[in-house]
Amino acid sequence: MKYLAFISLFFCFYFGFSQSQKINIKAKLNADDDTMAIIEEIIFYNHSKDSLKNIYLHNWANSYKDPTTPLSKRLLDDYDRSLYFSNKKDRGYSKIYSIINKHSLANFTIDESTPDIIKVSLNETLKPKDSIAIIATYQVKIPNAKFTKYGKSKNGYHLRFWHLTPAVYDTKWHLQSNYNMDDLYMLPTDYKVEFTIPKSFDLVSELYKKTIVNKNEKTYHLNGKKRVDLEIDIINANEFKSYKFKGLEVISNLNTKDLNYNISKSLINREVNFIKKYLGKYPHSKLLLNKIAYKKNPVYGLNQLPKFLNPFQENFEFDIKTFKILTKKFIDNTIITDTRKDYWLNDSLQTFLMLKYVEKYYPEIKAIGNISKIWGIKSYHLSEIKFNEKYPFVYQFAMRKNLDQPLKTRTDSLSTFNRKIVNKYKAGIGLNYLDNYLEKGTLKKALNKFYKNKKLTKTNTNAFKKELLNHTKKELNWFFNDYLKTKKRIDYTIKKITKTKDSVYVKIKNKTHFSAPMTIYGVQNKKVIYKKWLTNIDTTKTISLPKLDYKRITLNYNYLIPEFNLRDNWKRFNNSLLNRPLKLRFIKDIDDPYYNQVFYNFIYDYNYYDGLILGLSFSNKTLFKKKWSYKIAPAYGLKSSQITGVFSFKFQNYYPNSELLNQFYFGSVFSTFHYAPN
């Protein structure tokens, strides 16, 4: 007790003139029973205008303690029963021995429904702009890493969210249970850590590190300022490599055997410099990248393709994987938002930077890589989709099935599919849409300024909007209201084209009444000869274009705008029966807006009176849902020597903004077969 009182007195004096949050930890790992003995001091600063009688601590180490925790229930929602049916020895927990405040034991409570949150009753009221020191003595049992990938694995221990952290208070407490979303909201914190581990292990961290080696132990002294995460790898075989650049050291185990160190280093250096151009300099001296981060945030479409087909070159795979995690860590460690409320901002920046990076260095890479060159596949539109085009493709797929959710939906209310993929993609292509609409590098300038002013401080969507409006006079409510807060679809069509002596008049219809900016193009032989941004089209609007040598007029030609339906964006000047040419393909493909697609397939069946039935089916069904779909399947019965077959059509429509009706559909099926002689 005297020792703890001394620590408290020392740190109150040491931090007395600071307004930053501080955490001092003394921890010792016992590898025999996978436990840590911890003494932790928290210097909590009251940034609000309210006086506080209690403070809350996040205790996520305790979220593994039994099958009834919010974490276990969340994993069950994701069809993961590993924690719910786990053995006790594999689970983790924290055992709080004492919490001291003002040299006296403080009362604390842990609600059974939220065992990963601790309420601490202060011995004295904490006034605005004042700070208080809290010392906690506790033990943490490290869980098996199979639950969330954090914990004990065959290689050692991967620790994240392993110690007590104060919850954020502004006008209210932001309390968060662990839902395996890696989104703990905390303010930038100065860390001092003394961590003792068995001598056979190495400790890897992005904090400044000093090591003292004793007979059977190693003690690491770690220091870091303005950190929002304390991630530590304790491993028995160090596979991490260090890449040192001017002002920054990147520590990574995202290595590949087929790529030598110098090539890897040059690629990471290019990545760091690319991010700097859009945001600015990373404020810390070290950045840790590990396989766990990539496994939890993979580049979808990269790992899902068969490895034996070698779809992508080794340097591209390494580059894009590393860039994905580098951008995530860079952004999450510097742009501090309420991660359950304003997650879209960090997600949009990461996906946007991915888009721009691939656009610059790998513009011709296909979404399915070298598989697109295989005979039998290369004739399909799927093989033509570029790597960056997968983002609007996936978002459109979700829209067509009415699976998407607004970007301002809290993360704990999102489906796993939307949280991990769809909303990240929608956020990124939305920012790319904004970049193209604002033009002249406006977004890049705003991002630089926003990062310079807001890095390592608490920020939100409104601050980002304000910075954008400082750089443009264009109206942005369509983005920050409709695009972020609703499921409204962007969907325009060209109704009519009229030519006069010196102009072309185009009648455009807004089919959804979401009046987002739209582009119109004049195209000749796939070459753009005219482009214009259109705004304020609420219902219909006729615009005039100069009369140039167009072959066709199209909206959203390069698909930079995440539109619901691209198939009615074209109008040719000739009066042909089909506005788009016919494309006949075997089996299904993805939507190709340039063509009327018809897919055929061989069919066979059997019944007693018709005998063996052979035929062909023709359909317009693609991998995306359509409002109108049909299927025609004429066939011939070899025994009856008669024509048989099926004809069907279906209409379906989704209602994304209705609380009462999700979808409406009707259809009919007509068939003819023989069920008796003649």
Image: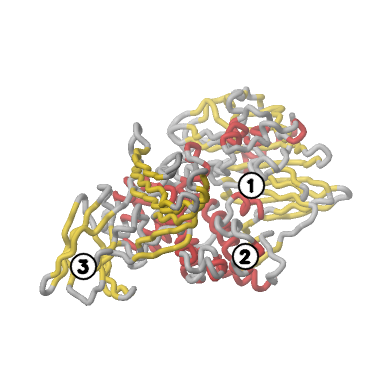
- Disc 1 secondary structure class: loop
Q: Nearer the viewer, mark 1 or mark 3?
A: 3
Q: Say if residue 239 shows up in the picture.
A: yes
In the rendered view, does 8 fall on the left or right side of 425?
A: right
Which of 480 and 95 lies nearest the eye of the viewer?
A: 480
> Which color scheme does this rendered protein use?
secondary structure
Image quarter where the C terminus lies is top left
Pointer 2 or 1: first along the chain: 1
- Quadrant of res 34: top right
Query: Marks 1/3: CA distance?
Result: 66 Å
Q: Residue furthest right?
A: 215
- Mark 2 belongs to which amino acid? Phe
Q: Which comes sooner in the sequence, label 2 or label 3?
A: 2
Give the number of the disc on residue 318: 2
Is residue 654 shown left or right of residue 242? left
Of the two numbered discs 1 and 3 on the same chain, state the one appearing first in sequence: 1
Label ID, residue 238: none
Q: In this figure, which residue is indicated by the disc labeled 3?
A: 575
The amino acid type, in three-letter code, at marker 3 is: Asn
At 26% from the left and 63% from the top, the residue drawn is: 533
Give the Cα distance between marks 2 and 1: 25 Å
* Percent coordinates x, y for residue 30 in the rendering: 81, 40
Residue 118, horizontal then vertical, whole percent: 60, 29
Element assignment for label 2: helix
Mark 1 lies on residue: 230
**As drawn, 339 above or below 501:** above
| Residue in front for this viewpoint, 560 or 606 | 606
Disc 2 residue crowd, few under 14, some 14–19, many 20+, Cα 10 Å: many
Q: Amino acid at mark 1?
A: Leu
- Location of residue 324 with respect to 502 vertically, above or below: above
